[in-house]
Image (cartoon, coloured by chain):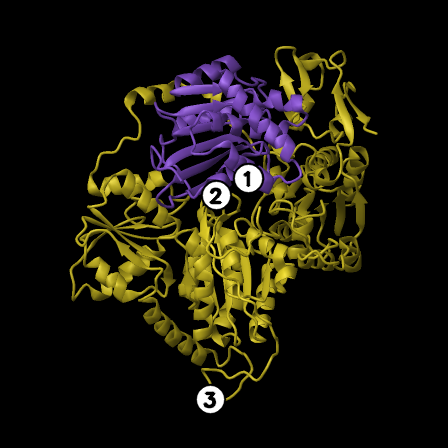
Amino acid sequence: MKKLLKDPINLVVAGVGGQGNVMVSLVIGNALVHEGYFVTIGETYGSSQRGGSVMSHLKISAEKQFSPLIPEGQADVMLGMEPVETLRVLKSFGNKNVVTVVNPRPIHPVDFTGSGSGYPDLESLLEQIKSMSAKTYVVHATDEALKMGNAMLANMILIGALLKNGLLPLDEAALAAVIKEMFPKAVAANTKALKLGMELVSIL
Amino acid sequence: MPNIDIDAPGSNQLFIGNEAMARGALEAGIGFASAYPGTPSSEILGSLAEVAKKRDIYVEWSVNEKVAIEEGAAASFAGIRSLVAMKMNGLNVVIDFLSTITLSGIGKKGIVLMVGDDPSAHSSSNETDSRPVSKWLDIPLVEPGDFQEAKDMMPFLYDISEEFGTICILRSVTRIAHARGNIRLGEIPKIAHKARFEQYFDPAAPMPTPIMCIPSSFRHMFQHMRIDKIREKFESSPYNKYVGPEKPDLLIITAGSGWLYSQDAVNALKAEDRIGILKLGTLWPLPEKLVKSCLSKADKVIFIEETDPFLEGVVMEYAAGFSAESKRNMFYGKQTRHLNSFGELTPDAVIKAITSVLDIKYAPRDAEYMKKVEAVPQDHVMDRLLTFCPGCPHRASFWAIKNALSMDGRNGFVTGDIGCYTMALGPAGFFQTRTHQCMGAGAGLANGFGQLQRFGFDQPVVSVVGDSTFYHSIIPALVNGVHNHSNFTLVILDNGATAMTGFQPHPGTELTAMGEPAVPISMENICRAIGARVEICDPFDLKNTTRTMLDLVEQNEGARVAIMRRTCELVRQKKDKKPYKMRIDPEKCLGEDCGCNRLCTRVFRCPGLIWDPSIGKTRIDEVICNECGVCADICPEGAITKEAVA
């Protein structure tokens, strides 16, 4: 177990209900606990209901157990599974040092007002995200996952991207062990997605 | 992922608080566990059910909380350690039983009631604080301050339960129960459980007696004596501790998640040398001497606790008692409005309260960044409404109910209940539901509305309940309605699972919690036996369901029942492929020019349907759509088509 450059490291995973937010934090959390770290995960969840904003807070420490919620403006790493949700969470938890990995695939909200104003302009969203992050990696995870035949693999692609940019004290071997443990029936597809995520970040 | 009974003592696991409590119960050697599902408590019984056969324990999802706790008590009476779990709403259901078992005492073996509170009501109809029940009914109560304690407190509590012959409560909150953290595992003992109800030697009586709550006043006095002894015992409990300087500027008194937030706040403010923390785990009876010795350390005291000012009240009561012999403290907390007594605690709220009392400056972000935050256009972070899953049968059911009530034309409305379908209060169910209280309340309200014709009331009333809710608390209301000629329609949305809390079985399903064959209790047979007219329909057959619903509403007398039966989409997709391939024909979709007022994306609003302003037509989001086929039946132009998948 390495001493962390900052303790705790605060990671926020943001997305929309149904995307697999809880699973992403569980994969990362389990890998870190196997490596000997203290991990606390807090989730906002809406039962089994879908379509709402969801996020997980992960606090990673080599020293102690922290609370399950990150205070305002204290995120170190943002894993954004959806662009609007990434921006929403940066507003609350971002700061000038935060590093962001974002999947630019929109999930449209159900039309509340019936105004049909639709989804905000994607380019403008990404501009805002970049201006509020020290560094931003745009990873087309859903598009790549659909090419692989399963949209849910976007999550493992994003974890791969997070791994490669060195923001977490984790390596590929640690993730490989967790993939075997958590997805015994889909080891090959998840491993492939993880590697793809790592490659995509290298190209950026 | 490993089961909670993983045989690796000393190893570190990432468990949610509920799994930690379940593991703790196994390490305490329970033989019996019963519960009714409710967020944030459901994973306790769920994770025990997975290992029940292997560990040779009995685990049951009971019909409701009251039966669950009475079963747990029976196990204790017969010499088996038992665990009963529920959310705080369930605690209200079992108060009557609790108020008597606290007098009668328990059997030879312990019984622990785990209650999951939900501050901020993330997944609840209220945010009641369970802790005052302990003081009110003289029941010992502990609250874990982290994940390790969530596990370790279980064996501790069983020992207390047996030593003093009383039921005990473990209260946790969402941010412990549903958060994850590190757990170091202990040993699970191998116990050959042997149950027998024998002569009961009552510590309060000179001879064997039945386990009974009379003579009540005598037993009430005896329970008070017990509580005094337990208070003495809790003085040295390892779950209470003081950390910090000997003479701090501020003393925090805290418990539960407040303990974690308090440490985070002191850390963030770098105020370790100014602030001391008294972390309490045994909240009732609260150890008086420990509190007294800590109050003498500081002039200023702040209480950091979830929801009600419970510790704040008890400590101030104590302090009033010993103010004559010691100094007076300044108390801060919910009563001084430094923290709210509604909504959950957050690290930011705790930081703010401390900085206010100690006059410390704290700015989490610089001004330049805050400018960027404020410059984000509002339409870039639009609200996301919760809605039914794509392919959820409830959307179709409420579509049929809405259309039937609209055709009836007498301003009919829905009385709501507790489940995913609560969302019909909003656009997910087309705003049909007009009341929302507790489990079963919708049917009781419908009974009442249904008797108001004599006062000129002429609106049709529809009580909509889920299948699990039906068994939990609707049957008496239907009995009452049929017996008294109340005029309402009961709609049971039968999706074959307790969906909102994680698909637990209920008395209508074919398997028990432990995966063994159950006797499914037919809801239609129950309703017919009570004497109600019963119609059964498939909500995905919109036309027939709407017609049936209209016919029932127009019957306009007596209590009658529609069962709208279709498996929960999340359950279905685990077993089957998508049934259809959905398409939208851009030639046929007329967009805003159609007379339908964009029925599909503006009214029906399944998240799988997207309005695409760039082409002025509706599209299907292939990542979201579950291809259920229902929307094909709502498009007036036939632009949405479904093609059966072979």
Q: State the mark number for residue B206.
A: 3
Using the image, name the chain to which the residue with label 2 belongs. A
The amino acid at mark 1 is: Val
Image coordinates of residue A53 in percent, x first then y, are: 52, 31
Percent position (x, y) of residue A73? 35, 30
The residue depicted at 48 percent of the width and 25 percent of the height is: A164
* Badges 1 and 3, same chain: no
The percent coordinates of residue B317 (x first, y second) are 28, 62
Indicate the secondary structure of the residue bearing disc 3. Answer: loop
N-terminal of the pair, mark 2 or mark 1, is 2
Report, in whole angstroms, how far the alpha carbon at label 2 lies from the one at label 3: 56 Å
Residue B379's spot in the image, x, y percent? Answer: 48, 19
Task: Read off the chain for label 3.
Answer: B
Which secondary structure lies at badge 1? helix
Q: Is residue A147 above or below residue B60?
A: above
Question: Residue A178 has which mark?
Answer: 1
